[in-house]
Image: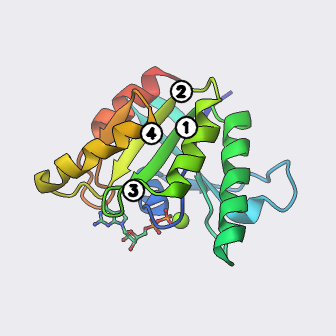
Amino acid sequence: MMSIVAVVGRPNVGKSTFFNRLIQRREAIVDAVSGVTRDRHYGKSDWNGKEFSLIDTGGYVKGSDDIFEAEIDKQVELAIDEADAIIFMVDVESGVTGMDEDVAKLLRRSKKPIFLAINKVDAASRVNDALEFYSLGFENQYNISSINGSGTGELLDDLVKAL
Ligand code: GDP
Ligand code: MG
Protein backbone atom coordinates (compact mmCIF):
# COMPACT_ATOMS: atom_id res chain seq x y z
CA MET A 1 0.00 0.00 0.00
CA MET A 2 1.17 3.47 -0.86
CA SER A 3 1.65 5.75 2.13
CA ILE A 4 -0.83 8.56 2.68
CA VAL A 5 0.16 12.06 3.73
CA ALA A 6 -2.55 14.56 4.69
CA VAL A 7 -2.16 18.34 4.76
CA VAL A 8 -4.37 19.92 7.42
CA GLY A 9 -4.80 23.40 8.86
CA ARG A 10 -7.20 26.30 8.87
CA PRO A 11 -8.23 28.07 5.65
CA ASN A 12 -5.81 30.34 3.77
CA VAL A 13 -2.57 29.10 5.28
CA GLY A 14 -1.46 27.78 1.85
CA LYS A 15 -2.37 24.08 1.88
CA SER A 16 -3.55 24.00 -1.75
CA THR A 17 -0.56 26.01 -2.96
CA PHE A 18 1.72 23.45 -1.31
CA PHE A 19 -0.32 20.54 -2.69
CA ASN A 20 -0.29 21.88 -6.25
CA ARG A 21 3.45 22.41 -6.05
CA LEU A 22 4.05 18.77 -5.10
CA ILE A 23 1.69 16.62 -7.10
CA GLN A 24 2.39 15.20 -10.52
CA ARG A 25 -1.12 13.96 -11.21
CA ARG A 26 -4.45 13.98 -9.50
CA GLU A 27 -6.09 10.78 -8.38
CA ALA A 28 -9.78 10.06 -8.47
CA ILE A 29 -10.11 8.16 -5.23
CA VAL A 30 -13.64 7.96 -3.89
CA ASP A 31 -13.57 8.49 -0.19
CA ALA A 32 -15.20 5.80 1.94
CA VAL A 33 -16.86 8.45 4.06
CA SER A 34 -19.73 9.88 2.04
CA GLY A 35 -19.90 13.61 1.62
CA VAL A 36 -16.23 13.98 2.34
CA THR A 37 -14.77 13.66 -1.13
CA ARG A 38 -15.80 17.13 -2.21
CA ASP A 39 -13.68 18.57 0.61
CA ARG A 40 -10.56 16.66 -0.32
CA HIS A 41 -8.19 16.52 -3.26
CA TYR A 42 -5.89 13.55 -3.82
CA GLY A 43 -2.65 13.57 -5.70
CA LYS A 44 0.40 11.45 -6.15
CA SER A 45 3.87 12.69 -5.37
CA ASP A 46 7.31 11.34 -4.69
CA TRP A 47 10.46 12.49 -3.01
CA ASN A 48 13.84 10.75 -2.85
CA GLY A 49 12.32 7.87 -4.79
CA LYS A 50 9.48 7.29 -2.33
CA GLU A 51 5.95 7.61 -3.70
CA PHE A 52 3.05 8.74 -1.57
CA SER A 53 -0.53 9.91 -1.89
CA LEU A 54 -1.05 13.48 -0.81
CA ILE A 55 -4.40 14.74 0.46
CA ASP A 56 -5.27 18.42 0.35
CA THR A 57 -8.11 19.09 2.79
CA GLY A 58 -10.76 21.77 3.03
CA GLY A 59 -10.88 22.53 -0.69
CA TYR A 60 -14.49 23.45 -1.16
CA VAL A 61 -15.57 24.28 2.35
CA LYS A 62 -17.77 27.36 2.45
CA GLY A 63 -19.81 28.93 5.21
CA SER A 64 -19.55 30.63 8.54
CA ASP A 65 -16.54 30.40 10.82
CA ASP A 66 -18.44 27.85 12.93
CA ILE A 67 -18.86 25.57 9.94
CA PHE A 68 -15.21 26.04 9.06
CA GLU A 69 -14.14 24.95 12.51
CA ALA A 70 -16.34 21.83 12.45
CA GLU A 71 -15.13 20.96 8.94
CA ILE A 72 -11.51 21.40 9.91
CA ASP A 73 -11.98 19.21 12.98
CA LYS A 74 -13.54 16.54 10.78
CA GLN A 75 -10.64 16.69 8.33
CA VAL A 76 -8.14 16.44 11.17
CA GLU A 77 -9.93 13.39 12.64
CA LEU A 78 -9.97 11.74 9.19
CA ALA A 79 -6.29 12.49 8.70
CA ILE A 80 -5.48 10.99 12.09
CA ASP A 81 -7.40 7.85 11.09
CA GLU A 82 -6.14 7.29 7.56
CA ALA A 83 -2.85 9.10 7.06
CA ASP A 84 0.60 7.66 7.74
CA ALA A 85 1.95 11.15 8.35
CA ILE A 86 0.33 14.57 8.73
CA ILE A 87 1.55 17.97 7.62
CA PHE A 88 0.01 20.60 9.89
CA MET A 89 0.24 23.92 8.08
CA VAL A 90 0.17 27.34 9.74
CA ASP A 91 0.78 30.87 8.46
CA VAL A 92 3.62 33.05 9.71
CA GLU A 93 1.78 36.19 8.52
CA SER A 94 -1.06 35.69 10.99
CA GLY A 95 0.94 34.09 13.79
CA VAL A 96 -0.60 31.47 16.11
CA THR A 97 -4.40 31.65 16.06
CA GLY A 98 -7.00 30.04 18.31
CA MET A 99 -7.96 27.72 15.47
CA ASP A 100 -4.33 26.61 15.13
CA GLU A 101 -4.32 25.80 18.85
CA ASP A 102 -7.52 23.76 18.51
CA VAL A 103 -6.06 21.76 15.61
CA ALA A 104 -2.82 21.26 17.54
CA LYS A 105 -4.75 19.89 20.51
CA LEU A 106 -6.45 17.28 18.29
CA LEU A 107 -3.19 16.33 16.59
CA ARG A 108 -1.22 15.96 19.81
CA ARG A 109 -3.53 13.07 20.79
CA SER A 110 -2.50 11.18 17.65
CA LYS A 111 0.43 8.79 17.51
CA LYS A 112 1.02 9.62 13.83
CA PRO A 113 4.12 11.61 12.89
CA ILE A 114 3.22 15.30 12.65
CA PHE A 115 5.24 17.82 10.65
CA LEU A 116 4.51 21.45 11.45
CA ALA A 117 4.94 23.50 8.27
CA ILE A 118 5.14 27.22 8.97
CA ASN A 119 4.24 28.60 5.58
CA LYS A 120 4.80 31.99 3.93
CA VAL A 121 8.33 32.28 5.32
CA ASP A 122 9.27 33.76 1.94
CA ALA A 123 12.21 35.75 3.27
CA ALA A 124 14.79 35.47 6.05
CA SER A 125 13.16 38.49 7.70
CA ARG A 126 10.24 36.25 8.67
CA VAL A 127 12.29 33.56 10.40
CA ASN A 128 12.06 35.28 13.79
CA ASP A 129 8.28 35.49 13.51
CA ALA A 130 8.15 31.73 13.03
CA LEU A 131 9.61 31.06 16.50
CA GLU A 132 6.28 31.65 18.25
CA PHE A 133 4.93 28.44 16.70
CA TYR A 134 7.09 26.41 19.10
CA SER A 135 4.26 27.10 21.56
CA LEU A 136 2.14 24.58 19.63
CA GLY A 137 4.44 21.86 20.98
CA PHE A 138 5.64 20.02 17.88
CA GLU A 139 9.18 18.76 17.60
CA ASN A 140 9.34 18.68 13.80
CA GLN A 141 8.99 22.32 12.77
CA TYR A 142 9.87 23.67 9.31
CA ASN A 143 9.87 27.17 7.89
CA ILE A 144 8.66 26.91 4.32
CA SER A 145 7.41 28.98 1.42
CA SER A 146 4.91 27.17 -0.78
CA ILE A 147 5.23 29.98 -3.29
CA ASN A 148 9.02 29.94 -3.78
CA GLY A 149 9.68 26.41 -2.49
CA SER A 150 12.22 27.31 0.16
CA GLY A 151 12.38 24.88 3.08
CA THR A 152 10.11 22.33 1.41
CA GLY A 153 13.08 20.04 0.65
CA GLU A 154 14.01 19.70 4.32
CA LEU A 155 10.41 19.02 5.25
CA LEU A 156 10.05 16.34 2.56
CA ASP A 157 13.40 14.73 3.46
CA ASP A 158 12.18 14.12 7.01
CA LEU A 159 8.62 13.29 5.96
CA VAL A 160 9.54 10.41 3.63
CA LYS A 161 11.88 8.97 6.30
CA ALA A 162 8.79 8.58 8.50
CA LEU A 163 6.78 6.71 5.83
P1 GDP B 1 -5.53 27.04 1.73
O1 GDP B 1 -6.86 27.65 2.01
O2 GDP B 1 -4.85 26.62 3.00
O3 GDP B 1 -5.58 25.93 0.72
O4 GDP B 1 -4.59 28.19 1.13
P2 GDP B 1 -4.25 28.54 -0.40
O5 GDP B 1 -3.22 27.61 -0.94
O6 GDP B 1 -5.51 28.66 -1.15
O7 GDP B 1 -3.51 29.95 -0.23
C1 GDP B 1 -4.15 31.04 0.42
C2 GDP B 1 -3.42 32.31 0.03
O8 GDP B 1 -2.09 32.32 0.54
C3 GDP B 1 -3.29 32.50 -1.48
O9 GDP B 1 -3.47 33.85 -1.78
C4 GDP B 1 -1.86 32.06 -1.76
O10 GDP B 1 -1.31 32.65 -2.91
C5 GDP B 1 -1.16 32.52 -0.50
N1 GDP B 1 0.06 31.74 -0.22
C6 GDP B 1 0.19 30.40 -0.23
N2 GDP B 1 1.46 30.02 0.05
C7 GDP B 1 2.16 31.16 0.23
C8 GDP B 1 3.55 31.45 0.53
O11 GDP B 1 4.40 30.59 0.69
N3 GDP B 1 3.87 32.77 0.67
C9 GDP B 1 2.96 33.77 0.50
N4 GDP B 1 3.39 35.02 0.64
N5 GDP B 1 1.66 33.54 0.20
C10 GDP B 1 1.27 32.26 0.07
MG1 MG C 1 -7.23 25.02 -0.17
For the residue marked with disc 4, what is the amino acid? Leu
First in sequence, mark 4 or 1: give its number: 1
Q: Nearest to the eye among marks 4 and 3: give it.
A: 4
**Quarter of the rendered structure image containing ligand 1:** bottom left
Callout 1: SS? strand
Near-viewer residue (94 or 113): 94
Q: How far apart are the alpha carbons under marks 3 and 2?
A: 22 Å
User: Which residue is disc 2 drawn over?
Assistant: 113
Query: In x, y percent, where is residue 146?
Result: 33, 56
- Left or right of 58 on screen, residue 20: left
Callout 2: SS? loop
Query: In x, y percent, where is residue 73?
Result: 69, 52
For the residue marked with disc 1, what is the amino acid? Ile
Quadrant of the rendered image containing residue 69: bottom right
User: Which residue is disc 1 drawn over?
Assistant: 86
Query: Disc 1, disc 2: CB below 8 Å?
Result: yes
Q: How far apart are the alpha carbons under marks 1 and 3?
A: 17 Å
Query: Disc 4, disc 1: CB below 8 Å?
Result: no
Residue 21, numbered circle: 3
Q: Residue at x 44, y 39 (%)?
A: 136
User: Which residue is disc 4 drawn over?
Assistant: 136
Name above or below for residue 138 compared with residue 152: above
Near-viewer residue (30 or 110): 110
Name above or below for residue 27 compared with residue 155: below
